[in-house]
Amino acid sequence: MSTPIKFLTKNFGAYDTSSIGAYMNIGGFSALKKAVNMDPEDICTLLSDAKIKGRGGAEYPLGRKWSQARAVRGENKVVICNADEGETTTFKDRELIKNDPFNLIEAMIIAGFVCGATDGYIYMRAEYACFRPLLLNAIRQAKNYGFLGENILGKGFNFNIHLYSGGGAYVCGEGTALIRSIEGKAGRPRMKPPFIKVSGLFARPTCLNNVESLSLVPHLLVDSETYMHCGCGDSIGTKLISVAGNVNNPGVFEIPFGTTVREIIYELAGGIQHDREIQLIQFGGASGKVADASILDTPYTYEDLRAAGVMVGSGGILVIDKRTSVLDFLRMNQEFFSEESCGQCTPCREGNLHIKIILDKMAAGTATPEDIKTMATIARVMSMSSLCGLGETAQNSLQSAMLKFPEVFDLGGARA
Amino acid sequence: MSEMIHLTINNIPVEVPQGTKIMQAAQTIGIDIPHLCYHEDQRIKAHCRLCSVEVTGKRRLLAACSTEVWEGMDVHTDTQIVRDTQVSILQLMLANHHKDCLSCPRNQNCDLQKLCSRFNILKSHLPSVVKEEPRIETNPAIVRDPSKCIRCGRCIRACKDVQGIAALTYAGRSSDITVTTAFNKPMEQTDCILCGQCSLVCPTGAIVEKDDTQKVLDALQDKNKHVIVQVAPSVRVALGDAFGLEPGAIVTGQMVTALKLLGFDKVFDTNFGADLTIMEEAHEFLHRLEHGGTFPMMTSCSPGWVNYMEKHFPSCIDHLSSAKSPMSMFGAIAKTYYAEKAGLKPAEIVTVSIMPCTAKKFEAARPEMGRDGCRDVDIVLTTRELIKLIKYVGLSIGKLPENDFDSPLGLSSGAGAIFGATGGVMEAALRTVYEKVTGKTLEKLEFMDVRGFDGIKECTVNLPGRDVHIAVAHTLKNARIIMEQVKKGTSPYDFIEIMACPGGCIGGGGQPIGTTNAIRKKRMAALYEIDQNLPIRKSHENPDIQTLYHDFLSEPLSEKAHELLHTHYHKVDKPYSFN
């Protein structure tokens, strides 16, 4: 039986999210007060010791990222909170914003302090516009209380937070596209270098973090012990996951790393509707890889999932039962990328189009073994040579499905 | 001296300065990494991904155009995944490209075609996904064929980064992404000034000059027409590129022979028109100095620049010289003075202009450039179209004997020759202005301060009684800097030369495909060489110009000169209409 845990979510429901006083009554801003009296490098070390990896999907070590952001020379550095949360089946950041907005604000101020930034931007997806008043209120109150603005907590540290809503493009979750979007340009990724840590938003050094990554920091500063005791192996602590699909109880859950996929799906998410059989599970949103039911007893850790051929990614888990064929799932996923590619680079723009055509041919029963070969080549070329992470990962589901469900792609025998 | 980096490419040791990209490092050992969006004069886009290479230790391929080399880097350009990537990307492009290669204006001069040939792509494995769209031929200068666009973004960069106009941009996303204008308007209805720099960098046939070669071939076959041709100064130093000659090769005499062999009745020189422009423009400047007028005065021979003024700085139109361009002056003289001399009616003469420029096609079509319903310049061909005609009749420029231009509109000075380079018009004008004002012979004809490739050049010329402050700019991005001052009334200059294209006409939008800044500089040097070697180097000393004034125009700025050689430009309404 999995044990429910409340570390990252411990403030959920514990205070009136419209009131900074209520937040402070439960210990709010004590992490910031502690942080400003610490050597920022020690904070990076704390994050590194906790082995926190970026929770947006790229899994970049947070301590290293902040340490690098600190080391970059430059004026007017920027911290961005990536609240675009565009991955399908991923809605954990939504819960963090909705249930604990002040913790996010506090986390951004700490990030600003550590990185030496003067401005923080929250880039929130268009669909979360309903939380704008909540966040704007939190920012205003934090400013009134002196946690934002000039000379914060008397430490000579100046920091302000700006809220920016996206226009609805999936690709704007990609760092450079997100930055262009805030700059008022079309949200299309650009080549790197320059890396955004050196030249990001408005050409300023920029440190970009996911909502969950940031939200962890105040909790960790106050109580690292609890966190360090959770998890297993190198996957320390807890993780917020969102489960969707054909389950009885879809939703967001905080789990200690090491909880098995079976516990997640059959206990937390209440099992499959009408006790149907699992067809496939996709981990990490539309750009994630798929597994069959043999993954159920794998512990949910970075290492174990990777060994099983999938990744934690965005923390989204999509459970598909037998009513949907693997092919139909792939077509649905492909539909998404065929819409959401920015269109700049050739492999992603044209590759997504042709893979869609071949998947449709498969569905119509007109595909040839040659088509399958072509599709596999295009998928590999896309993942190896696309300009940005979207093109790199768009065919994760197809490529993993080709490994896990080879029978779906074996047309030779069937058509001979 | 920058630090040297040691790496290996396909196991060959390479040493290059720090900051070198993989693509250039490979070039030093003779390896050409395929590329399409990369252009040596543009900032790197890394969109096409065709230059992807394998670097040991890297999980993914890296773009050779955008990745700097590092110490110990181990690059492979010939592995299976690299080959698969190159071929797949070309296949993907081909599937979304209108492949009417045999009837494409860029046939045998297309980067995509060359690469497909290089990689021996004999058939396309992928179904065609081209959206059939008609060619957009709504203006006399530039034709767009979106079904041939490979979305490399070169035209966008040329328009935005070189010209500062950004008439072209990406629109849409995913496979619907297109390169288009604001609201998909025809180019002439946007901020576009038809300079054609986009057509010069397009790797395929997606943006091309409007082809008028057939009109010329038809005219040449028409027994009732007397077909004369004039050739712009910059064409003679660019034409050779297409025939395997060194960039900057001077092929004036061979070009004249080619035109005669093509069947033109007379082969004249736009340089003659340039000398005439100097006579009028220099005297206009002196007139403004003596009698008052709008300052700074600005040259008006670059049609892209004139279009820019009309569209982007309409309130400053009065700053433009009223003198027509050399091409249009030539046209006016051809249909009057020359017609009289040759005993022909203007309607019997067909004036063909060979220009380095797409916007000249638009200039020639302006209603004010003609009289009595008869155009001064009937057909304008770009250098590229002339190359096609010369190849059509099977001539090889390098091997042709040399010939002289015909009289009476073929003799020109060195001042006329340098019109083709940025700063050349100003230098030519100053040679005449100086001597007219001082009455003295100008000892040193070279105004070195206005030569060269710098974006904005300045100098001060001491004339009796006053110093004249000069500025010279090329590309409209630089022109904008000058114009913002003019518009605010803070311009420190008296006389300004502006050329729309980089380097001036030698880098014009109608020049041979493959024109780069390095090549522009060689053409520029060639023009100054022509000037250096001519016996007459000042426009007012051109005896045929003197005869023209004596027999026909009387004097600069005369009534007749005004009627034929001057014009007025108009404010163009805001380019956007939301109807």
Image: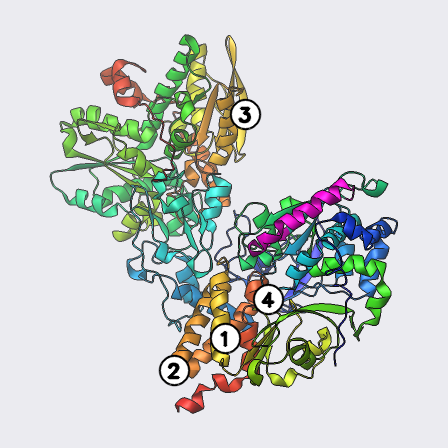
Residue indicated by mark 1: A330
- Does residue B64 belong to the magenta stretch? no
Q: Is residue A101 left or right of residue B361?
A: right
**Secondary structure predominantly adopted by residues drawn in magenta:** helix
Residue indicated by mark 4: B61
**Residues flagged by tags 4 and 2 on a common chain:** no
Pointer 3 indicates a residue of which chain? B
Q: Is residue B349 visible?
A: yes
**Residues flagged by tags 3 and 1 on a common chain:** no
Q: Would you say the residues marked 3 and 2 are in contact, meaning their CB atoms lie under 8 Å apart?
A: no
Find the distance from the CA under tag 4 to the CA under tag 3. Answer: 47 Å
| Amino acid type, label 4 | Leu
Q: Is residue A291 above or below residue A188?
A: below
Q: Circle 4: is it few (<14), some (14-19), or many (20+) Cα within 10 Å?
A: many
Among the two numbered marks 4 and 3 on one chain, the one whose residue lies closer to the N terminus? 4
| Amino acid type, label 3 | Glu
Q: Secondary structure at mark 1?
A: helix
| Amino acid type, label 1 | Leu
**Residues flagged by tags 1 and 4 on a common chain:** no
Residue indicated by mark 2: A365
Find the distance from the CA under tag 3 to the CA under tag 2. Answer: 71 Å
Find the distance from the CA under tag 1 to the CA under tag 4. Answer: 26 Å
Across and down, in percent, residue B376 comes to: 23, 30
Q: Is residue B68 left or right of residue B258?
A: right
Name the residue nearer the viewer: A134 or A288: A134
Residue B458's mark?
3
Across and down, in percent, residue A224 comes to: 84, 63
